[in-house]
Image (cartoon, rainbow, N blue to C red):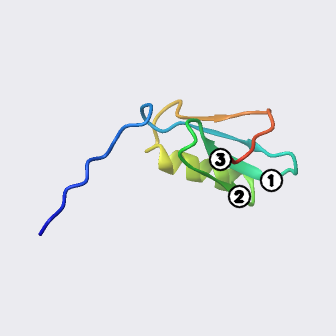
């Protein structure tokens, strides 16, 4: 038997902020709290965020503000 699972939309397409946390780690944080991670450097965080957003223009922003993962 095949079961179909519907995908729900939670606030539109993915968008990420890339920046540092209070300890200096690089983070990529989805703006609606749906994902993210800690990375060894800025380029790894950007690469992850760009991949997750499907390379959409303006879907990834770099910020100077302190970020945190919830």
Whether residue 61 is situated above or below residue 5 in the rendered picture: above
Q: Of marks 1 and 2, which one's residue comes earlier in the chain?
A: 1
The foreground one among 14 and 59 is 14
Label 1 with label 2: CB-CB less than 8 Å: yes
Q: Secondary structure at mark 2?
A: strand
Q: Residue at x 53, y 30 (%)?
A: 58
* Structural distance between the alpha carbons of marks 3 and 1: 10 Å
**Image location of residue 1, percent across then percent down:** 11, 69
Question: Of the numbered discs in the image, which one, if any, rests on residue 25?
Answer: 1
The furthest residue to the left: 1
Question: Of the numbered discs in the image, which one, if any, rests on residue 56?
Answer: none
Residue holding disc 2: 39
**Image location of residue 52, percent across then percent down:** 49, 49
Q: Secondary structure at mark 1?
A: loop
The foreground one among 21 and 51 is 21
Left or right of 50, for residue 66: right
**Image location of residue 29, percent across then percent down:** 63, 44
At label 1, counting other C-alpha atoms closer than 10 Å, the crowd grade (few under 14, some 14-19, many 20 or more) is some
Label 3 with label 2: CB-CB less than 8 Å: yes
Report which quarter residue 61 is drawn in. top right
Report which quarter residue 20 is drawn in. top right
Q: Residue at x 79, y 33 (%)?
A: 64
Label 3 with label 1: CB-CB less than 8 Å: no
Q: Residue at x 34, y 41 (%)?
A: 8
* Structural distance between the alpha carbons of marks 1 and 2: 7 Å
Q: Residue at x 26, y 48 (%)?
A: 6
At label 2, counting other C-alpha atoms closer than 10 Å, the crowd grade (few under 14, some 14-19, many 20 or more) is some
* Structural distance between the alpha carbons of marks 3 and 2: 8 Å
Residue holding disc 3: 28
């Amino acid at each position: 038997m095949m079961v179909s699972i519907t995908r729900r939309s939670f606030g539109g397409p993915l968008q990420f902020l890339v920046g540092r946390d209070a300890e200096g780690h690089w983070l990529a944080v989805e703006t609606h709290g749906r994902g993210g991670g800690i990375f060894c450097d800025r380029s790894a965080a950007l690469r992850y965020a760009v991949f997750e957003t499907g390379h959409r223009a303006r879907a990834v922003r770099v910020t100077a503000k302190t970020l945190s993962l919830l």
